[in-house]
Amino acid sequence: MVYAILTGKTEEIYVGLFKYVRNVLPLQYDKLTIITDFELGLINAIRLVFPESSHQGCYFHYCQSIVRHLRSKESGMYNLVKANPIAARIFRMVLALPYLPPNSNNNRIPSMLDGFNSIIMYIVQHTEIAEYFHDFMYQYVFGYWFVRMRPEAFTIFDKDIRTNNYLESYHAALLRFIKPHPKIWEFMGQIRFLENQYNLEFKQVSQNLNIRSCNSSRGRIRNTSEIKRFMQDLIEDDAPDRILTFLRRAGHQVNGYIAQQIGPYPDEQELLLHEANNSQIIIIN
């Protein structure tokens, strides 16, 4: 565990920190994957100091950013997603885009851009809501995530560890445990206490003993297994809407998080039931 008390959050400050870390920690940096949020100064510093390491954007922070934009006044889509089942499905599929690879040389595995284009084609079929999604899809999702950040920065394709939530959890514990503006010796003592606690839990995990995070670990393993099954179905599927089917199924995995953030809204099961009730069955004798 490395702690750093910094005077700011600029690329220059991050570069100085990472150079020091690299000098004192003899790691195999060519085998290291660094997971962060999408702060550009931080990402640039990592690429500069650890060029041989892999960088991966945190999926939780991707979802958090998309939901935050949804709730902003400029998006104008919050009430639409809350009320319209088609809009809610589109929103979930956007959250599922990182499950696809940034590029693809395999015609059975579509890229993230293929997924984006499939969502666009789905949107234009629903003229009653297409206008509302125009700026969201082209200016925000494509303009920011695909052009500025690039798909390589936020894909989680074939990744077992997709977030840095364990670190976010530790950070939340720090904020709860350490009072604002502590004296330096109080701060150091509290840091040591928390580190001892987490070292104890690490030893328990090494001995296959249960700790409070075991449920989240099982959930992550279950989610990974389901996504791999969805991907295999996508590879074997020949239907013209197979990409949408994958995104719809993968997007359902974050349904609970969305509901937690924005409250009750139409889920996938409601929409499937609605579509089944409105389908027409023609019998030819």
Image: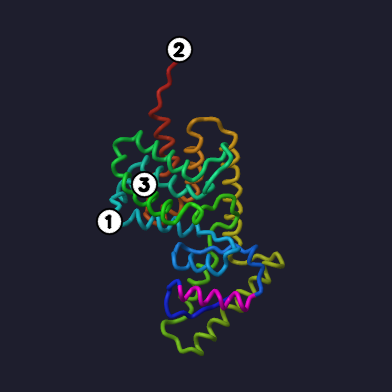
- Would you place residue 275 above or below residue 183 in this image? above
Q: Nearer the viewer, residue 130 or 282?
A: 130
Pointer 2 or 3: first along the chain: 3
Where residue 254 sits: x, y (%)?
47, 51
- Neighbour class for label 2 at 10 Å: few (<14), some, many (≥20)? few
Which mark identifies residue 137? 3
Disc 2 versus disc 3: distance between alpha carbons? 42 Å
Circle nearer the viewer, 2 or 3: 3
Pointer 1 or 2: first along the chain: 1
- Magenta part of the chain: 12-25
Pointer 1 or 3: first along the chain: 1
Disc 1 versus disc 3: distance between alpha carbons? 16 Å
- Neighbour class for label 1 at 10 Å: few (<14), some, many (≥20)? few
**Residue that numbered label 2 is attached to:** 284
Where residue 162 sits: x, y (%)?
55, 57
Q: Secondary structure at mark 2?
A: loop
**Residue that numbered label 1 is attached to:** 73
User: Which residue is pictured at 56% across the width and 40% down the height?
Assistant: 109
- Would you place residue 256 above or below residue 280 in this image? below
Q: Please name the predominant secondary structure of the magenta segment in the image.
A: helix
| Amino acid beneath label 2 | Ile
- Neighbour class for label 3 at 10 Å: few (<14), some, many (≥20)? some
Can you say which quadrant of the picture contains the N terminus? bottom right
Question: Where on the picture, by quarter, is residue 192?
Answer: bottom right
Where residue 9 sits: x, y (%)?
43, 73
Q: Nearer the viewer, residue 38 or 177?
A: 38
